[in-house]
Amino acid sequence: MDILQQHEISEAGHRILNPFTDDKLMLLGSLCRLRPGQRQLDLACGKGEMLTRWADAFGIEGHGVDISEVFLAAAHERAAELGVADRVAFELGDAAEAAAALKGAGFDIVSCIGATWIGNGLAGTLALMQPALRDGGLMLVGEPYWTEPPPADAYPALGVGPDDFTSLHGTLERLEAAGVDLVEMVLADGDSWDRYVAEQWWTVDEWLRANPGSPDAPAMRDYLRAARHTHLQYQRRYLGWGVFVLKVSAPVTS
């Protein structure tokens, strides 16, 4: 059983596939000064909740890319439900390849929320995003950070290396080193982490009760047990998460 299948099962009840509440998602749209006619490219868009909600609330247009047929089916359903199917489109495919194919497309916003693995990390993902962005446009990146230095055994439990993430200030330094300016941000908190993760526990528990004989059941039982312990022991305390609103740094003139 691969990681994508685990996410498709565990996040079956979610609309937002990261530790962000609905209020924070809409606050982010307001802070980005979104307006009708703007165009957004969302890489690894999941169920398309950002694009569909912002199309509905702010009148933007959007294009989302994801590798999950399950998530994209939900995105199409959500777009129809909100009456924005004529303003948002969804593409099944590799987000990095799609970004390269859209070089020069001039999107007003290019986003990658919680999936910087598409570029092998923060810097690589920012480099992927920029060619599809218009001059003066916004990049939105969702990225974890350490709220305090974690113990050594937190890294294998969370499935990350010591240098994969850094502190909140260290994240700023990584952004600056990548040639972008931080102009706004919206951060998750412990409660939004709980709502994201604990809802998965319920969903997986219900799935296991409905599918006790599935060949995937043993893997999902292990996943559920590890997810509970990891969140309560390490994730909630040590791992922050936020969306960072960025602009390409202006050239310095003398």
Image: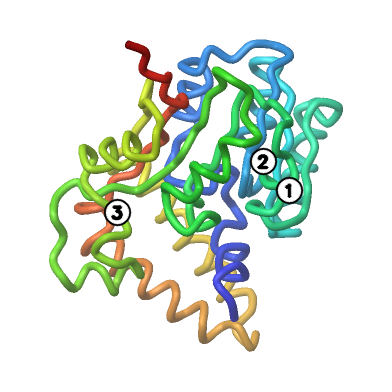
Residue where numbered disc 1 is placed: 74
Nearer the viewer's eye, disc 1 or disc 3? 3
Q: Is residue 249 left or right of residue 2?
A: left
Looking at this view, is 210 or 156 the one in front? 156
Looking at this view, is 184 or 100 the one in front? 100
Dot 3: element? loop
Q: Is residue 131 left or right of residue 220?
A: right
Residue where numbered disc 2 is placed: 48
So how many labels did they put on this image? 3
Report the coloring of the rendering.
rainbow
Residue drawn 39% across the image and 39% down it: 178
Q: Residue 92 at what x, y percent from top left?
A: 77, 54
Q: Residue 220 at what x, y percent from top left?
A: 51, 77
Residue where numbered disc 3 is placed: 165
Dot 2: element? loop
| Amino acid type indicated by mark 2 | Gly
The N terminus lies in quadrant: bottom right
Estimate how packed mark 3 is, as few (under 14), some (14 to 19) or many (20 or more) residues with alpha carbons within 10 Å: some
- Seen in the picture, residue 198 relative to 189 is either above or below; the reply is below
Q: Quadrant of residue 70?
A: bottom right
Residue drawn 51% across the image and 30% down it: 139
Q: Is residue 64 left or right of residue 175?
A: right
Give the mark, 1 or 2, whose residue is nearer the N terminus. Answer: 2
Looking at this view, is 55 or 126 the one in front? 126
